[in-house]
């Protein structure tokens, strides 16, 4: 039988680059049994084979804009005109909230582009760095690694590769696939982008902007966390404590806008029951603040 501890250690080993064969030997479990268990969890949509997409290495600027609508009225929006949206998330805390990824530089916002009578901008900025959260074996704590650690700097990217990378970011945040292969991704990309040389661009170039990772979502709620932290160590401590308190189930990717201090948006899976439980919490961490936005729909 595959226990939860074995499962978590397996995921940690796989995410640290260890093969399933070596992971099964390290943990002393049958490889076939372990593989079947992982596949069952994927089929039940409890485990996701995720792709980190390193949008910080694109020539195209990518920005995040978070806006609170002043009413829950139909047809209201925060950004005027036709901004080049990559993906938008709808949340509701005290007010309807729209979190948008935009293919443009929003390090500064022209007030004329905001529907100020309907919306209040909470946060905006251009993504400068992507961080990949990794857990150690037999250690629930998170380490935050920069995307440059995983990048093959010798690969040259063109405009088609960047378009594919942005589409992959849209497809995997949250992941719309169950168990997938490269051929599945290429087929989906062809349908959505209509590109002829998708396979070549993906397997030879755009794949350099990605990293495979297993994410254990369980029955959690996809959520975005707007966080600020004096240091990355403090941010990692926050994620570790949220995980230890069972509020945070797993983390996919952190998109940084500011480095000193860290300010950015973290993609994660959250237990709403634990989040709303008054008795659940973590120790105070100095120099850290955050807001959790459960995602109710994606556009």
Image: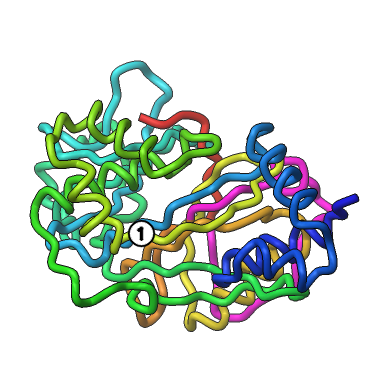
Residue 219 seen in this snapshot: no
Rendered location of residue 24, percent (x, y): 75, 64
> In the depicted view, which residue is nearer to us: 12 or 120?
12
Rendered location of residue 279, percent (x, y): 85, 54
Residue 208: image quadrant is bottom left
Residue 30: image quadrant is bottom right
The C terminus, quarter of image: top left
Dot 1: element = strand
In the rendered view, tell whether residue 219 sits above or below residue 19: above
Q: Residue furthest right?
A: 1
Per the image, is 282 magenta?
yes
Exactly how many numbered labels are in the figure? 1
In the rendered view, tell whether residue 97 sits above or below residue 205: above
> In the depicted view, which residue is nearer to us: 287 or 294?
294
Q: Residue furthest top?
A: 74
> In the depicted view, which residue is nearer to us: 2 or 277?
2
Residue 16: image quadrant is bottom right
Residue 189 seen in this snapshot: yes
> In the depicted view, which residue is nearer to us: 84 or 44?
44
Rendered location of residue 168, percent (x, y): 32, 45
In the rendered view, tell whether residue 150 sits above or below residue 65: below
Determine which residue is flagged by label 1.
210
Q: Residue at x 33, y 76 (%)?
A: 148
Which range is magenta? 267-290
Rendered location of residue 155, percent (x, y): 18, 69
Per the image, is 8 magenta?
no
Q: Residue at x 27, y 42 (%)?
A: 167
Q: Residue at x 55, y 70 (%)?
A: 17
Q: Residue at x 16, y 60 (%)?
A: 108
């Amino acid at each position: 039988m595959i226990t939860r501890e074995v499962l978590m250690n397996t995921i940690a080993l796989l995410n640290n680059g260890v093969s399933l064969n070596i992971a099964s030997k390290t943990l002393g479990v049958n490889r076939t049994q372990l593989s079947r268990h992982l596949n069952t969890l994927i089929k039940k949509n409890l485990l996701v084979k995720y792709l980190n997409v390193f949008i910080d290495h694109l020539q195209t600027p990518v920005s995040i804009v978070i806006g609170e609508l002043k009413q829950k009225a139909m047809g209201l929006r925060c950004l005027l005109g036709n901004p080049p949206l990559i993906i938008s998330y709808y949340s509701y805390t005290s007010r309807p909230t729209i979190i948008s990824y935009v293919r443009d530089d929003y390090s500064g916002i022209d007030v004329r582009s905001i529907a100020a009578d309907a919306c209040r901008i909470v946060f905006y900025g251009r993504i400068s760095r992507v961080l990949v959260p990794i857990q150690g074996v037999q250690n629930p704590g998170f380490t935050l690694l920069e995307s440059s650690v995983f990048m093959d700097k010798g690969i040259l990217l063109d405009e088609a590769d960047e378009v594919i990378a942005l589409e992959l970011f849209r497809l995997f945040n949250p992941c719309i696939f169950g168990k997938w292969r490269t051929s599945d991704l290429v087929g989906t990309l062809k349908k959505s982008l209509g590109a002829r040389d998708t396979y070549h661009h993906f397997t030879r170039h755009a794949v350099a902007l990605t990293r495979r990772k297993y994410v254990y979502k369980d029955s959690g709620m996809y959520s975005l966390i707007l966080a600020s932290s004096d240091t990355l160590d403090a941010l990692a401590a926050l994620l570790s404590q949220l995980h230890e308190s069972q509020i945070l189930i797993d983390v996919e990717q952190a998109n940084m806008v500011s480095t000193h201090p860290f300010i950015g948006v973290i993609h994660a899976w959250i237990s709403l029951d634990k989040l709303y439980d008054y008795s659940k919490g973590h120790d105070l961490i100095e120099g850290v603040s955050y807001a959790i936005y459960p995602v109710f729909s994606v556009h």
